Amino acid sequence: MAEQHGSIAITARLLRDVESLLKHPSVSIELAQRGVNASIAILAVQALTSYVEGNRVRARDDFATVAEEIRARLERP
Protein backbone atom coordinates (compact mmCIF):
# COMPACT_ATOMS: atom_id res chain seq x y z
CA MET A 1 0.00 0.00 0.00
CA ALA A 2 1.36 3.42 -0.95
CA GLU A 3 1.97 5.96 1.76
CA GLN A 4 -1.06 8.15 2.24
CA HIS A 5 -1.24 11.82 3.02
CA GLY A 6 -3.92 14.34 3.81
CA SER A 7 -7.61 13.61 3.90
CA ILE A 8 -7.37 9.99 2.78
CA ALA A 9 -4.89 9.14 5.53
CA ILE A 10 -7.06 10.86 8.14
CA THR A 11 -10.15 9.05 6.90
CA ALA A 12 -8.40 5.66 6.93
CA ARG A 13 -7.14 6.33 10.48
CA LEU A 14 -10.64 7.25 11.64
CA LEU A 15 -12.06 4.09 10.12
CA ARG A 16 -9.42 2.02 11.91
CA ASP A 17 -10.42 3.76 15.14
CA VAL A 18 -14.04 2.76 14.48
CA GLU A 19 -12.87 -0.80 13.87
CA SER A 20 -11.05 -0.77 17.22
CA LEU A 21 -14.16 0.50 18.97
CA LEU A 22 -16.26 -2.26 17.43
CA LYS A 23 -13.83 -4.81 18.88
CA HIS A 24 -14.42 -3.52 22.41
CA PRO A 25 -16.44 -6.07 24.43
CA SER A 26 -19.00 -3.55 25.70
CA VAL A 27 -19.71 -2.39 22.15
CA SER A 28 -20.08 -5.97 20.96
CA ILE A 29 -22.55 -6.67 23.76
CA GLU A 30 -24.66 -3.61 22.99
CA LEU A 31 -24.66 -4.40 19.28
CA ALA A 32 -25.71 -7.98 19.99
CA GLN A 33 -28.59 -6.72 22.11
CA ARG A 34 -29.76 -4.83 19.03
CA GLY A 35 -29.39 -7.87 16.80
CA VAL A 36 -26.21 -6.58 15.14
CA ASN A 37 -23.29 -8.95 14.64
CA ALA A 38 -20.08 -7.12 15.59
CA SER A 39 -17.96 -9.26 13.27
CA ILE A 40 -20.06 -8.25 10.28
CA ALA A 41 -19.89 -4.60 11.34
CA ILE A 42 -16.09 -4.87 11.61
CA LEU A 43 -15.87 -6.42 8.15
CA ALA A 44 -18.03 -3.60 6.77
CA VAL A 45 -15.65 -1.02 8.22
CA GLN A 46 -12.67 -2.95 6.84
CA ALA A 47 -14.34 -2.98 3.43
CA LEU A 48 -14.89 0.76 3.56
CA THR A 49 -11.29 1.29 4.63
CA SER A 50 -10.09 -0.79 1.69
CA TYR A 51 -12.28 1.21 -0.68
CA VAL A 52 -11.06 4.55 0.65
CA GLU A 53 -7.47 3.35 0.32
CA GLY A 54 -8.08 2.34 -3.29
CA ASN A 55 -8.18 -1.42 -2.86
CA ARG A 56 -11.43 -1.85 -4.75
CA VAL A 57 -11.14 -5.62 -5.30
CA ARG A 58 -10.81 -6.34 -1.58
CA ALA A 59 -13.58 -3.82 -0.84
CA ARG A 60 -15.87 -5.53 -3.36
CA ASP A 61 -15.23 -8.95 -1.88
CA ASP A 62 -15.67 -7.77 1.70
CA PHE A 63 -18.83 -5.79 0.93
CA ALA A 64 -20.24 -8.84 -0.89
CA THR A 65 -19.56 -10.97 2.18
CA VAL A 66 -21.20 -8.38 4.44
CA ALA A 67 -24.30 -8.23 2.23
CA GLU A 68 -24.48 -12.02 2.04
CA GLU A 69 -24.21 -12.42 5.81
CA ILE A 70 -26.82 -9.75 6.55
CA ARG A 71 -29.19 -11.23 3.97
CA ALA A 72 -28.78 -14.73 5.45
CA ARG A 73 -29.54 -13.44 8.94
CA LEU A 74 -32.62 -11.56 7.77
CA GLU A 75 -33.97 -14.68 6.08
CA ARG A 76 -33.72 -16.77 9.23
CA PRO A 77 -37.02 -17.41 10.99
Image (cartoon, rainbow, N blue to C red):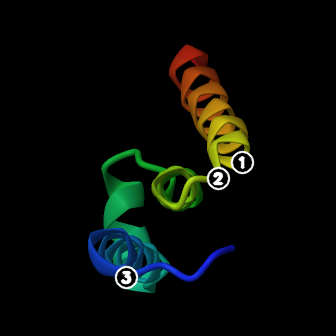
Please tell me in which quadrant of the rendered image residue 5 appears. bottom left
Task: Give the residue pinned by disc 2.
Answer: 55
Q: Quadrant of residue 57?
A: top right
> Which residue: 32% across, 77% down?
14
- Amino acid type of the residue that numbered disc 1 sits on in the rendered structure: Arg
- Disc nearest the viewer among 3 and 2: 2
Taking the spot 40% from the left edge, 45% from the top edge, the residue there is 35
- Helix, strand or loop at label 2? It is loop
Could you tell me residue 34's position as x and y percent? 31, 49
Disc 1 packing (10 Å; few <14; some 14–19; many ≥20)? some
Instruction: Give the residue type at disc 2.
Output: Asn
Q: Residue at x 45, y 55 (%)?
A: 52
Along the line of sight, the residue nearer the viewer: 16 or 54: 54
Distance from disc 1 to disc 2, alpha carbons, whole Å, reads 6 Å
Q: Residues within 10 Å of mark 2 (few under 14, many from 20)?
A: some
- Establish if 67 lies above or below 45: above
Mark 1 or 2, closer to the camera: 2
Q: CA distance from mark 3 to mark 1?
A: 20 Å
CA distance separating discs 3 and 2: 19 Å
Give me the disc on residue 4.
none
Q: Are marks 1 and 2 in contact (CB under 8 Å)?
A: yes
9 vs 62, left or right, is: left
Q: Which residue is mark 1?
A: 58
Secondary structure beneath disc 1? helix
Q: Residues within 10 Å of mark 3 (few under 14, many from 20)?
A: few
Mark 3 residue type: Asp
